[in-house]
């Protein structure tokens, strides 16, 4: 039965990735129909991100009260309702309103589901599950493209994804009894009992845990690096390497393909390497990719560099999450993962726009240097985390 639940979790990760790339793929059509400036997409994404931060911080309290299964089902339903709201919206204000449940639904399920997998399954499943998220994130634009090319409009693209999320909600509701079952032992913990402390931890109490600040900064840096690379790699190739726009866009797509393939491979590597070794390996590969981008050897070398950055990113996110119970204990892992997720979304909100200011006022050629600086801080914080928690 526990393997059946694992299959449902895999399905959930694919489905959870579906909405994440919809706004970017549909916005070139959306902003014209809504009669708003193209920059307004940032407002919607900021509302979604803010809601995600709030719900991530509340994930410990919600999961302790309702359980992972019910939190996951409720969050997916909230996301489905928000997507349906997008599908019936015809104004920018309506999209902003529906962006609130969109973000609130995303944060709790992300933190709760990741903690459940970290506690009960091996590291390889964490890597493969996040690979499945990448599959979903890649399928989202294709579904939106199908709606647009078929003349059904972006509203119907959102409705298709909403229907898929509703189907997943029904599956999750029927699977609720499975979430109450437990394997023979809790992984990543010295205890074999289902440890739940008497009350949820406050944010101040979480931050005071040895290593918590370090893991928050590590996660902040990782997600800042990934999102900055994904957002600006195409512009860097066009403006600095003088590549045609279409070529740069296809090159940038390979960054995400590198992450997806890397996570599939990471699942096998975790059978031989532990989480710490996988994170260090990823950091070394990112370093080689950034240094490759600095070489003045043409567009093909730049292509290799961005592939390396994508491959290097692959194991870091899932392995940091999976190692959380081992570093902080099963009783604190949900709380710590919640603040990790919140830190991640703060990083994705702040750091890519900051590089935009640097590119605009100084030079976009600083792109690899910017990634290197973030990587160095990430490496230092992760090593400090290990000294405090091991």
Image: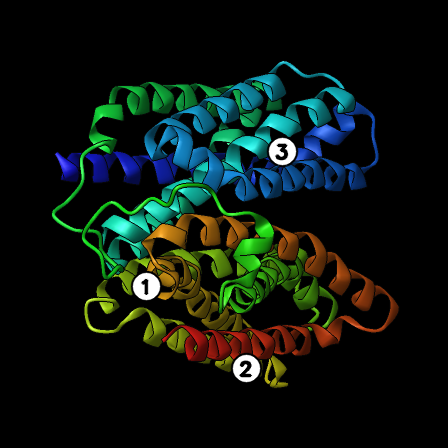
Write down the residue under mark 2: 292
Is residue 141 in view from this perspective?
Answer: no
Residue at the location (35% across, 73% down)?
276
Query: Foreground: 312 or 340?
Result: 340
Pointer 2 and pointer 3: residues touching (CB < 8 Å)?
Answer: no
Is residue 1 in view from this perspective?
Answer: yes
* Distance between mark 2 and mark 3 Cα atoms: 33 Å
Say what secondary structure mark 2 lies in. Answer: helix
Quarter occupied by residue 274: bottom left
Position of residue 157 measured from the top left corner of the image (x, y, whole percent): 54, 24
Write down the residue under mark 1: 326
Q: With respect to residue 71, does 85 lie above or below? A: above
Left-right relation of 118 to 378: left
Residue at the location (28% across, 51% down)?
119
Residue at the location (64% across, 61% down)?
228
Quarter occupied by residue 204: bottom right
Left-right relation of 301 to 367: left
Left-right relation of 193 to 51: left
Position of residue 256 measured from the top left corner of the image (x, y, whole percent): 48, 56
* Distance between mark 3 and mark 1 Cα atoms: 41 Å
Colour pattern: rainbow
Write down the residue under mark 3: 26
Q: With respect to residue 115, does 387 lie above or below? A: below
């Amino acid at each position: 039965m526990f393997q059946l639940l694992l299959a449902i979790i895999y399905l959930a990760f694919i489905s959870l990735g579906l909405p994440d790339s919809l706004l970017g793929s549909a916005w070139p059509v959306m902003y014209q129909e809504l009669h708003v400036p193209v920059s307004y997409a940032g407002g919607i994404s900021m509302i979604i991100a803010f809601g995600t931060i709030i719900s991530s911080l509340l994930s410990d309290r919600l999961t302790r009260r309702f359980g992972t299964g019910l939190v996951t089902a409720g969050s997916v339903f909230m996301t489905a309702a928000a997507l349906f709201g997008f599908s019936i919206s015809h104004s920018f204000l309506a999209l902003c309103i529906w962006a609130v449940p969109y973000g609130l639904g995303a944060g709790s399920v992300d933190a709760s589901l990741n903690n459940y997998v970290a506690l009960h399954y091996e590291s390889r499943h964490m890597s493969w599950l996040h690979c499945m998220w990448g599959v979903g994130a890649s399928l989202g634009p294709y579904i939106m493209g199908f709606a647009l090319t078929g003349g059904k409009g972006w509203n119907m693209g959102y409705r298709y994804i909403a229907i898929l999320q509703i189907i997943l909600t029904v599956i999750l509701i029927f699977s609720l009894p499975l979430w109450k079952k437990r394997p023979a032992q809790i992984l990543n913990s010295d205890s074999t009992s289902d440890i739940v402390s008497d009350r949820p931890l406050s944010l101040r109490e979480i931050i005071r845990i040895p290593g918590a600040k370090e893991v928050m900064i590590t996660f902040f840096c990782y997600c800042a690096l990934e999102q900055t690379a994904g957002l600006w790699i195409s512009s860097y190739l066009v403006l600095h390497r003088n590549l045609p726009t279409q070529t740069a866009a296809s090159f940038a797509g390979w960054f995400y393909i590198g992450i997806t393939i890397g996570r599939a491979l990471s699942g096998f590597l975790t059978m031989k390497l532990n989480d710490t070794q996988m994170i260090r390996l990823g950091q070394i590969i990112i370093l080689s990719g950034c240094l490759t981008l600095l070489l003045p050897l043409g567009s093909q070398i730049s292509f290799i560099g961005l592939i390396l950055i994508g491959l290097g990113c692959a194991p870091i996110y899932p392995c940091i999450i999976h190692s959380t119970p081992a570093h902080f204990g099963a009783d604190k892992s949900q709380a710590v993962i919640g603040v990790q997720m919140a830190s991640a979304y703060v990083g994705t909100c702040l750091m890519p726009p900051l590089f935009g200011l640097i590119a605009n006022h100084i030079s976009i050629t600083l792109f690899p240097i910017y990634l290197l600086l973030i990587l160095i801080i990430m490496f230092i914080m992760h090593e400090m985390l290990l000294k405090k928690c091991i």
